[in-house]
Image: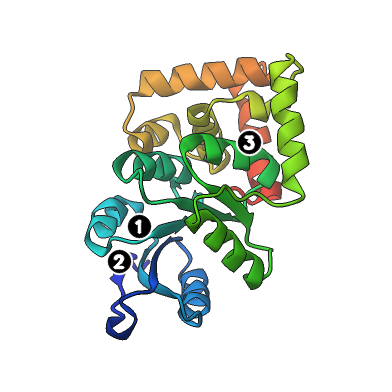
Amino acid sequence: MVKDKITHHKAVSRSNSVKIFIVDNHPIVRQGLSQLINQQHDLVLCGESGDIRHVLPAIKKSKPDIVIVEIALGTFSGLKVIEDLCREYPDIPVLILSIHDEILYAERCLRAGAKGFIMKEEPPKQLLFAMRKVLNGDLYISDKLGPKLINKLVSKSTGVSSSAIERLSNRELEVFQYIGQGMKTRDIAGSLNLSIKTIETYIAHIKKKMGFKSSRELFLFAVQWSITDRKF
């Protein structure tokens, strides 16, 4: 397996263009985004990476005006990336471009600090629109998601229960996703830099919230959910 590296882009003749950094663990996707961005007269790609361990220092070096992030990043958590980015660089807006379920993840990403969420199935012109909207200081969510997100927030405020998965906290959702990948408790603890006991506590909370009587029931459901919804 080839280890992904940070790529920095130089654009001497376009120094006044808006600089964009991409975080996505699929090289083909990054290449396509790079071509789309560099075709625009006012945009330029200043860096890209699929390895989140090096993203923060790379962003410090390249100084982008906006960061585009895919939250499906292999064995790493995209939600954690958003939180870290928004904490370390609060003035740099983050736009999520994802294969993830928009209804389930958009609210979580916005709460983590992202300024917009757009699905990869959208046409290129919509992505460019979303980028420019976020760069202008506005939030971007799709026309389809807007009313649903509002209804969801209203339901929460009135005490209407949401689906079992939506009741999970961000950290519990991360653990749930790792379970769906077939990872053992020890491996999950290592990936999240937490103790095994802490992960066991999260798993107990997940089982309670989702109504599973055994870890096997949870495992089977998590694997099936991971496959059908293309998570991670």
Q: Is residue 223 visible?
A: no
Q: Residue at x 70, y 41 (%)?
A: 103
Name the side, left or right, on which 39 lies relative to 124: left
Mark 1 or 2, nearer chain start: 2
Mark 1 belongs to which amino acid? Asp
Determine whether the residue tagged by mark 1 lies in a helix, strand or loop.
loop
Mark 2 or 3, nearer chain start: 2
Contact (Cβ within 8 Å) of mark 1 with mark 3: no
Residue 147 quadrant = top right
Name the side, left or right, on which 23 lies relative to 166: left
Q: Residue at x 77, y 31 (%)?
A: 151
Q: Circle 1: is it few (<14), some (14-19), or many (20+) Cα within 10 Å?
A: some
Looking at the rendered image, the disc whose residue lies closer to the viewer, 2 or 3, is 2
Residue 115, percent from left and from top: 52, 47
Mark 1 or 3, nearer chain start: 1
Q: Residue at x 29, y 71 (%)?
A: 8
- The Cα atoms of the two marked residues, 1 and 3, are separated by 25 Å
Determine whether the residue tagged by mark 3 lies in a helix, strand or loop.
helix
Q: In front here: 159 or 18?
A: 18
Residue 84, percent from left and from top: 35, 41
Give above or below for 196 relative to 33.
above
Provide the residue designation for mark 3.
Answer: 222
Provide the residue designation for mark 1.
Answer: 51
Q: Which mark is residue 5?
A: 2
Mark 2 belongs to which amino acid? Lys
- The Cα atoms of the two marked residues, 1 and 2, are separated by 7 Å
Q: Circle 2: is it few (<14), some (14-19), or many (20+) Cα within 10 Å?
A: few
Q: Is residue 132 visible?
A: yes
The N terminus lies in which quarter of the figure? bottom left
Residue 187 quadrant = top left
Give above or below for 203 relative to 188.
above
